[in-house]
Image (spheres, rainbow, N blue to C red):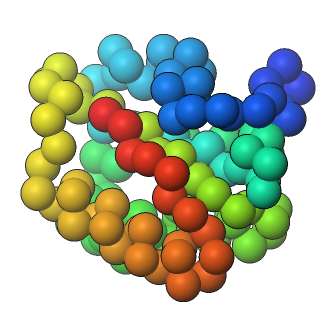
Amino acid sequence: MVKNIIKNKIIAKPSDVLNFCHKIRNSKDKLCKVFYLDENKKLLSVKTLNLDNKLPSKNFVIKEILIPCFYISTKSIILVHNHPNGLALPQQTEINLTKKISNIGHFFGIALIDHLI
């Protein structure tokens, strides 16, 4: 899941993950990268989701983001997604989805550190 070059990298702050997001920045598809971290903020895994056809089904997106947490003992996540139109302003549906992911994750002891566009 994670290239050896970045696996176990310490993510001290959310912006540390931006170096790993060059491919989604210029994508014509709406993509989301999920960074899975352990209790010491060490990178465990990275998953890329194509959100183009999934945002109407928010529950599907939430499951795709959170289910891997239980298999790799994730304690926190950072989300990064692009806007193919180039505008880095969050839409209300994205804000609501982020809150829902944060609340569900919190219930299971998984912190959402940040959601970057």
**Where 95 falls versus 20 (above or below)?**
below
Horizontal arrangement in the rendering, residue 9 relative to residue 82 (left or right): right
Horizontal arrangement in the rendering, residue 82 relative to residue 105 (left or right): left
Residue 22: horizontal and vertical position, in percent? 48, 15
Residue 2: horizontal and vertical position, in percent? 78, 35
Work out whether residue 105 or residue 56 is closer to the camera in this orientation and state it.
105
Q: Quadrant of residue 43?
A: top right
Residue in the image at 66% along x and 41% along y: 46
Horizontal arrangement in the rendering, residue 72 relative to residue 111 (left or right): right
Horizontal arrangement in the rendering, residue 96 relative to residue 77 (left or right): left
The C terminus, quarter of image: top left
The N terminus, quarter of image: top right
Residue in the image at 42% along x and 69% along y: 101
Instruction: Tell me if residue 93 can be seen.
Output: yes
Residue 38: horizontal and vertical position, in percent? 78, 54
**Where 67 falls versus 7 (above or below)?**
below
Residue in the image at 81% along x and 62% along y: 72
Residue 56: horizontal and vertical position, in percent? 21, 66
Tell how many labels: 0
Residue in the image at 43% along x and 38% along y: 80
**Where 80 falls versus 107 (above or below)?**
above
Work out whether residue 113 or residue 19 is closer to the camera in this orientation and state it.
113
Instruction: Tell me if residue 32 can be seen.
Output: no
Q: Quadrant of residue 109?
A: bottom right
